[in-house]
Amino acid sequence: MTTLPALDLHAHVDTAVSPRDLLNLRAVVFAASRSLAESHMALRRQPGDLLTVWGVGVHPGMKESLENYDPEGFGGLIERTAYVGEIGLDAKIASRLRKQHEVLESVLTQLQGSPRLTSIHSYGATTEIVDHLERNPITGAILHWWLGGRAATSRAIDLGAYFSINAATIRRSEALDLVPIDRILPETDHPDGNRGGARPHQPGNVTDVETALATMHGLDVVDFRLQTWRNLASLVAVTETRRLLPPRVAAIIEAVN
């Protein structure tokens, strides 16, 4: 297929944005939530957004999000979407790390029984994230904005993790060459990860990421985009989440298989 829309596996989108504006992005965007409260608002609009997949998240860098985490509430929300994001660890504030670890372990335990495409934050804690995934292995892990070293990256690959890559990742990663092409997914992490990326700075604009990674792997951009869609299709298959995707997104995945 030569008319596949772009894929953005991690962006932050205001839940008040109109469905028309999202459709005009001409991209399939996985919209990460920062808290269960935001997740509630996001999932209310899921049926009306044709190309946007709204996620359920508990951002590790947000105190209120961590304090308001409720395992039962989280479990109920993930029944309504194929996507969990974002969760993880953030070492910027050491005083919250204990709570972050507790929440992450709880979330991963639930995802063992209900696999989802799971976008994982790892700022300053890449080795600790891999440790968690070894203790509580899940299907569908996607390491978002991954800056782990070569040893941690190799361990994550062995665990079956995928990697969502933005413009900042390409500039800063020391281990991107280790990631197999069938584990790569593009992202913007709008509005933070694409500040130095291609204009316009908006969710779904992954042209610079696709170009750089296609060149790295000796492909043209059309073939590289097809590869990323096939990677997504593989993740959807192993997590058995196709039924939870917007019908138009599920139809594209069916077409690339």
Image: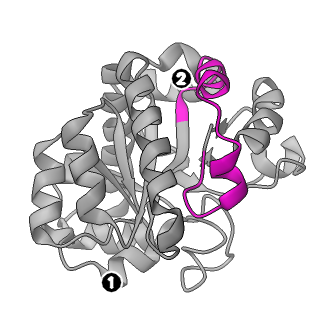
**139 in relation to 213, above or below:** above
Circle on res. 126:
none
State yes or no: residue 68 in magenta: yes
Image quadrant of residue 42? top right
Which span is picked out in magenta? Answer: 58-83
Q: Can residue 34 be seen?
A: no
Task: Name the amino acid, label 2.
Answer: Ala
| Quadrant occupied by the N terminus | top left
Badge 1 marks a residue whose secondary structure is: helix
Query: Would you call the spot at circle 1 few (<14 residues within 10 Å), some (14-19), or many (20 or more)?
Result: few
Q: Position of residue 172 (x, y in %)?
A: 33, 84
Residue visible at 18% across and 65% down?
217
Residue visible at 87% across and 51% down?
17
Of residue 217 and residue 192, the one placed in the foreground of this image is 192
Query: Would you call the spot at circle 2 few (<14 residues within 10 Å), some (14-19), or many (20 or more)?
Result: some
State yes or no: residue 215 in magenta: no
Task: Name the amino acid, label 1.
Answer: Arg
Residue visible at 45% across and 44% down?
102
Of residue 215 and residue 104, the one placed in the foreground of this image is 104
Of residue 237 and residue 215, the one placed in the foreground of this image is 237
Residue visible at 90% across and 47% down?
18
Q: Can residue 69 be seen?
A: yes
**3 in relation to 194, above or below:** above
Q: Position of residue 113 (x, y in %)?
A: 38, 16
| Mark closest to the chain's N terminus, 1 or 2 | 1
Circle on res. 250:
2
Q: Position of residue 127 (x, y in %)?
A: 23, 62
Q: Which residue is identified by label 1? A: 172
Badge 2 marks a residue whose secondary structure is: helix
Give the number of the mark in front: 1 or 2: 1
How much space separates mark 1 and mark 2, taking CA atoms? 33 Å
